Image (cartoon, helix red, strand yellow):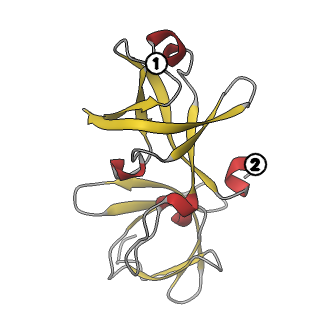
Amino acid sequence: MNNPLINNGFISIGKIVGSHGIQGAVKVYSYAESFSVFKTGIMILVKNPDDSTIKDYRIKWSAPHSRFVLLLFEGIDSRVPADNLKGFELFINKADLPELEKDTYYWNDVIGLLVYASDDNYIGRVESIIQTGANDIYIVVDEKNNEVLIPAIESVVLHIDIIQKTMKVNLPEGL
């Protein structure tokens, strides 16, 4: 990726879709599976989509709101400055993310992995992930833009190597 924030250890965690109320809160569409990344006191980088300027804000409070997260930033205390942040993307330092259990990964670590079958045949690259009720589904795309949907379950995903950026899978019959 060519985004200097991502190249420097930051990951995108959401996008401001509007303001909420008159106190200066913003409504965020979260890319994170858990709202816990939006904890009080943490610093968030806010990137303007028009001119790529970046400003940092400390979260004063946060609260889940339907499918969104409401955030109040220190220094934003009315609706007008909150309205001006609509469309801005939010980034967090990856070091500020909660530590994961063994054999669990953040989506941004999985997207981009090169996927190989158990016989070492190349299948494609993980382009995106679909969250379902039972398990995630990895969307793997090959050189001809063919998609393979791979369920993220232990019997299918044999090994993930974040350092080598590879995934080895045992595809069920029919995939």
Residue drawn 45% across the image and 69% down it: 105
Secondary structure of the residue carrying tag 2 is: helix
Q: In the shown orientation, is residue 42 left or right of residue 71?
A: right
Amino acid type for the residue under numbered disc 1: Asp
Q: In the shown orientation, is residue 39 left or right of residue 2?
A: left
Residue 58 in picture, x, y percent from top left: 52, 39
Secondary structure of the residue carrying tag 1 is: loop
Name the residue beneath numbered marker 1. Answer: 77
Residue drawn 50% across the image and 33% down it: 15
Instruction: Look at the picture and state if 7 lies above or below 27.
Output: below
As rendered, which of 40 and 169 lies closer to the eye? 40
**Residue 133 seen:** yes
Q: Quadrant of residue 123?
A: bottom right
Amino acid type for the residue under numbered disc 2: Pro
As rendered, which of 19 and 114 lies closer to the eye? 19
Label 1: few (<14), some or many (≥20) within 10 Å? Answer: some
The quadrant the C terminus occupies is bottom left
Name the residue beneath numbered marker 2. Answer: 4
Q: How many labels does the image show?
A: 2
As rendered, which of 3 and 116 lies closer to the eye? 3
Instruction: Look at the picture and state if 142 lies above or below 25.
Output: below
Q: Quadrant of residue 158?
A: bottom left
Residue lying at the far bottom of the rendered structure: 119
Q: In the shown orientation, is residue 47 left or right of residue 111?
A: right
Instruction: Look at the picture and state if 138 lies above or below 167.
Output: above
Residues tagged 2 and 1 counted as in contact (Cβ below 8 A): no
